Image (spheres, rainbow, N blue to C red):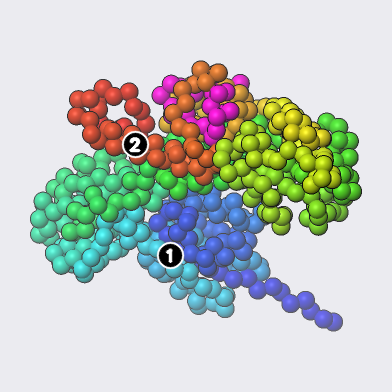
C-alpha cells in the first residue's frame, strides 16, 4: 500500500513596510500571492490590505491576529501542518516587534518551514516620505511599549544625530515628558507625521515643548522625528508636495478603463474616485460584425480604423470566437485615434500605419487620411468598427475622400447605474476637487446619473469635442491638454494645480482668504 505524502506548508513573517503598498518588497509580494492564510496585525493599513487582497488567491483567508504571540504562532503552525502556506503580515519590519520575535522563536522550535521577509521600518520609511533625513548617528525604532524606552539614550541620539520613533498617538505626551526629563532642549524641532505614506499623510512641525498640542487630532500610529533633519523639510518634503496631493478627483469612466487613469493620478498625489458612467455591451445583432470579420479575412478592406480601445477589444473578441489571430490582418492597414487605442492594437502584435500627429479626433485623422486613388488603392473599402452612439463625422469625411465605408456597430454603450447617494451628494456639493472627462458620453452620462459637478470643482476634458459637450451642459472647462490622451490629461491637471499654488503663494494673505480658488492647493495657504 502506497501512502500519499502529506503536503508541507510554509510560514512567512512578512514586513508590510510603513503603509504604502508600493513599498512591499518583491519577496513579500510573492509570499502574499502564494498564501492560503494571511494573519494580519491591526496596525497594517486597510489600504494596504485592500491592495493585497486584490492580488491574493480567491480562496485565501484573511484574519486579524488575536491573542498572545503563542496564540498567533499556533494558528500559523496549524495551517502549515495542514499543508497550507501561512503569512503573518506585520507593519514595518517583523523584527521591529518583540511579539513577532517571540512568534518566530515559537515556530523555530517546531519542524515547520519558515522565513522572515524584511520590510521597511515605519519610523525610517515615514521619515523619508515626510522629507526628514536622518543624518549622523541615527536612531529609528518602531515602538510597541513606550514604558520600555531608554530616554537617556534617545536624548543622546538627538544630541549626536537624528531620532525617529513610530508610536501610538496616545503615547505622545509620555514621549514628550520622557524626552524633557532626559534633558532634551524644549526648543528642539520636532516633526509629527500621521497616516505615514498614505493618501492623507500630514506632517506638523513644532518643538519638543509643543508637539503634543500640534498633533492634536492625530490618531493611530504616528512617526516622531527629532534632530537637524526636521529643519530640511521645506526643501526635501516630496510626498506631501506632489502637485495633486490631497485632491479628490472624480474619474467617470468604465471600470476597465479607469485603472490606468487612477494610477497616474495617484502618482501625482491625488485620491481618485472611480464612478462608472457607461457600460460596454455587445451589439444587439451580431450579423454586422460577423460579416466584417469575414471581410477582413477575405481581403475586402484596405483599412480598418479604430477610434477607441473598446472597438479594438470588440474586434479581437470576435476574432477569438472564430479561432483567428493577428496573422489574419495581413495586408490590411490600420489607423488609430489616440495613443491608448494604438497601444491596444500593438498589444496584439500589430503596428498601426496611421496615428494623427496633431489633434486626436475624427477631424485630426481626416486631415491626414489620403483620398482614395484607384491606381494606388485597388481595394477601396474601409472598415469602421465603433460604438452605436458615435457621430457620423468620420464616415462622412471618408466618403467625401472617395472611400467606401462599412460603418459597423462593434459595441453598445449604455448608461451605468447611479453611484451611491454619498457620491452623488459629493458631486453636487463640491466634495470633489476635480473631475476628468475623457469623452462626450462621460459628460452626458455623469450628469444624467449623478447631476452636474459643483462650480468649485475643476473640470478637465480630454479634447475639443468633450469640451463642447461640457460647455453645452453649463460646465466651465478649466483644463484641456494639447494632445488628447489620458497621460496628457492628468499631466495638464497637475500643471494647473501647480499654477494655482504659485498664484496663491504670490497673493497677499488677505486676498488668499477671499480667493474663490478651492481645493487642497488653496487650503494650504489659508
* Marks 1 and 2, how far apart at CA: 38 Å
Is residue 199 found left or right of 224 in the rendered image? right
Q: Using the rendered view, name the quadrant where residue 309 is placed.
A: top right
Label at residue 499: 2
Residue annotated with mark 1: 119
Q: Residues within 10 Å of mark 2 (few under 14, many from 20)?
A: some
- SS at mark 2? helix
Magenta span contains residue 491: no
Q: Residues within 10 Å of mark 1 (few under 14, many from 20)?
A: many
Q: Using the rendered view, name the quadrant where residue 123 is placed.
A: bottom left
Label at residue 93: none
Question: Magenta residues, as a range?
Answer: 448-470
Instruction: Give percent across and percent down for residue 319.
Output: 82, 49
Q: Which quarter of the rendering shows the N terminus?
A: bottom right
What residue is drawn where x is 21% and y is 54%? Answer: 232
Tell me if residue 468 can be seen.
yes
Q: Which quarter of the rendering shows the C terminus?
A: top left
Magenta span contains residue 455: yes
Mark earlier in primary sequence (1, 2): 1
Instruction: Give percent across and percent down for residue 227.
Output: 18, 59
Q: Nearer the viewer, residue 167 or 495?
A: 495
Instruction: Give percent across and percent down for residue 486.
Output: 54, 42
What residue is drawn where x is 33% and y is 51%? Answer: 238
Q: Nearer the viewer, residue 35 or 22?
A: 22
From this view, report whether residue 133 is shown above or below residue 397. below
Amino acid at each position: 500500500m502506497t501512502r500519499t505524502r502529506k503536503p508541507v506548508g510554509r510560514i512567512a513573517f512578512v514586513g508590510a513596510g510603513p503603509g504604502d503598498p508600493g513599498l512591499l518588497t518583491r519577496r513579500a509580494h510573492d509570499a502574499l500571492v502564494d498564501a492560503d492564510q494571511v494573519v494580519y496585525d491591526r496596525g497594517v493599513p486597510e489600504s494596504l490590505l485592500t491592495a493585497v487582497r486584490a492580488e491574493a488567491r480567491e480562496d485565501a483567508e484573511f484574519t486579524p491576529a488575536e491573542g498572545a504571540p503563542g496564540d498567533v504562532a499556533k494558528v500559523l503552525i496549524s495551517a502549515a501542518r495542514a499543508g497550507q502556506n501561512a503569512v503573518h503580515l506585520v507593519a514595518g519590519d517583523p523584527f521591529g516587534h518583540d511579539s513577532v520575535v517571540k512568534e518566530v522563536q515559537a515556530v523555530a522550535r517546531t519542524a515547520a518551514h519558515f522565513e522572515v521577509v524584511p520590510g521597511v521600518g515605519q519610523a525610517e520609511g515615514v521619515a523619508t516620505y515626510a522629507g526628514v533625513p536622518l543624518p549622523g548617528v541615527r536612531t529609528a525604532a518602531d515602538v510597541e511599549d513606550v514604558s520600555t524606552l531608554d530616554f537617556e539614550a534617545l536624548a543622546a541620539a538627538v544630541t549626536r544625530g537624528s531620532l525617529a520613533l513610530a508610536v501610538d498617538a496616545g503615547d505622545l505626551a509620555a514621549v514628550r515628558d520622557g524626552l524633557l526629563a532626559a534633558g532634551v532642549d524644549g526648543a528642539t524641532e520636532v516633526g509629527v507625521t500621521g497616516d505615514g505614506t498614505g493618501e492623507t499623510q500630514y506632517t506638523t512641525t513644532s518643538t519638543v515643548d509643543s508637539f503634543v498640542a500640534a498633533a492634536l487630532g492625530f490618531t493611530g500610529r504616528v512617526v516622531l522625528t527629532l534632530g537637524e533633519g526636521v529643519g530640511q523639510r521645506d526643501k526635501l518634503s516630496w510626498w506631501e508636495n506632489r502637485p495633486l496631493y490631497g485632491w479628490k478627483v472624480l474619474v467617470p469612466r468604465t471600470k476597465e478603463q479607469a485603472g490606468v487613469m487612477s494610477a497616474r493620478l495617484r502618482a501625482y498625489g491625488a485620491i481618485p474616485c472611480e464612478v462608472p458612467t457607461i457600460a460596454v455591451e455587445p451589439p444587439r445583432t451580431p450579423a454586422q460584425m460577423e460579416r466584417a470579420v469575414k471581410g477582413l479575412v477575405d481581403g475586402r478592406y484596405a483599412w480598418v480604423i479604430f477610434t477607441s480601445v473598446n472597438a479594438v477589444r470588440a474586434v479581437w473578441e470576435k476574432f477569438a470566437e472564430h479561432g483567428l489571430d493577428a496573422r489574419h490582418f495581413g495586408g490590411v492597414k490600420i489607423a488609430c485615434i489616440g495613443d491608448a487605442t494604438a497601444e491596444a492594437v500593438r498589444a496584439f502584435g500589430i503596428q498601426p500605419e496611421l496615428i494623427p500627429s496633431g489633434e486626436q479626433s475624427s477631424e485630426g485623422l481626416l486631415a491626414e487620411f489620403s483620398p482614395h486613388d484607384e491606381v494606388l488603392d485597388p481595394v477601396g473599402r474601409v472598415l469602421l468598427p465603433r460604438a452605436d452612439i458615435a457621430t457620423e463625422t468620420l464616415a462622412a469625411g471618408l466618403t467625401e475622400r472617395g472611400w467606401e465605408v462599412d460603418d459597423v456597430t462593434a459595441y453598445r454603450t449604455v448608461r451605468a447605474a447611479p453611484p451611491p447617494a454619498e457620491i452623488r451628494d459629493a458631486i453636487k456639493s463640491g466634495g470633489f476637487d476635480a473631475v476628468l472627462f475623457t469623452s462626450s458620453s462621460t459628460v452626458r452620462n455623469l450628469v444624467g446619473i449623478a447631476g452636474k459637478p459643483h462650480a468649485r470643482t475643476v473640470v478637465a476634458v480630454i479634447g475639443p469635442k468633450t469640451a463642447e459637450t461640457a460647455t453645452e451642459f453649463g460646465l466651465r472647462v478649466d483644463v484641456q491638454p494639447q494632445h488628447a490622451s489620458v497621460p496628457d490629461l492628468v499631466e495638464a491637471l497637475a500643471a494647473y494645480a501647480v499654477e494655482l499654488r504659485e498664484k496663491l503663494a504670490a497673493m497677499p494673505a488677505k486676498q488668499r482668504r477671499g480667493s474663490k480658488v478651492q481645493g487642497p492647493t488653496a487650503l494650504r495657504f489659508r
